[in-house]
Image (cartoon, rainbow, N blue to C red):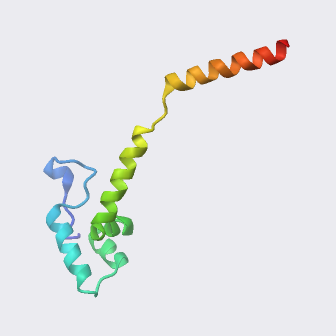
Amino acid sequence: MNIYKTKLTDLGVDRRVKLDNETKDYIRELYATGNWSYKTLAEEFDVSKSLIRWIIKEEAYADFLIKHKERLKNKFDKDKHNEYMRNYRKQKKELILN
C-alpha cells in the first residue's frame, strides 16, 4: 500500500480530490531534486502523469481553469437555438412554396 495516498473516502471529503496540499508540496519538492520524473511520481502516488504535471505546473493549471470557465459561459443556449431553427424552417418553407 502506498503510504502517501490519502484515503479520502475514510476522511469524508470530496472524493474527486486525489491528493492533499501537503502531498502536493512534497511532490513539488521531489520533482525539484531532478531525480524524479512525471511517470515515477505518478506511479509512486498512484495518480496520472497529467495530474502530476498540473501539480508541478500550477500556473498552467490556473490558466486552464480560467479558460474552462470561459467556455462554460458560452454554453449552448436552448432558446437561441429554438429561435434559429424556427427562422430556418420559415425560410425553407418560403423557398418551397415559391
Q: Position of residue 82 (x, y in %)?
A: 57, 21
Report how many numbered discs are placed on residues in the image.
Answer: 0
Q: For residue 45, what is the image quadrant?
A: bottom left
User: In the visual, does 30 lie left or right of 11?
Assistant: right
Residue 75 at least partly seen: yes
Query: Is residue 39 placed above or below 50 in the rendered structure?
Result: below
User: In the visual, does 59 lie left or right of 23?
Assistant: right
User: In the visual, does 82 lie left or right of 97?
Assistant: left
Q: Position of residue 65 (x, y in %)?
A: 34, 53
Residue situated in front as seen by the camera: 84 or 48:
84
Query: Is residue 56 placed above or below 83 in the rendered structure?
Result: below
Residue found 35% across the figure and 76% down from its top: 38
- Quarter of the picture containing the C terminus is top right
Residue situated in front as seen by the camera: 65 or 23:
65
Residue found 21% across the figure and 67% down from its top: 24
Q: Position of residue 79 (x, y in %)?
A: 50, 22
Q: For residue 95, what is the image quadrant?
A: top right
Q: For residue 84, what is the image quadrant?
A: top right
Residue 4 at least partly seen: no
Query: Is residue 34 placed above or below 63 in the rendered structure?
Result: below
Q: Position of residue 86 (x, y in %)?
A: 63, 18
Residue found 17% across the figure and 70% down from its top: 25
- Quarter of the picture containing the N terminus is bottom left
Q: Residue furthest right?
A: 98
Residue situated in front as seen by the camera: 85 or 15:
85
Residue found 83% across the figure and 16% down from its top: 96
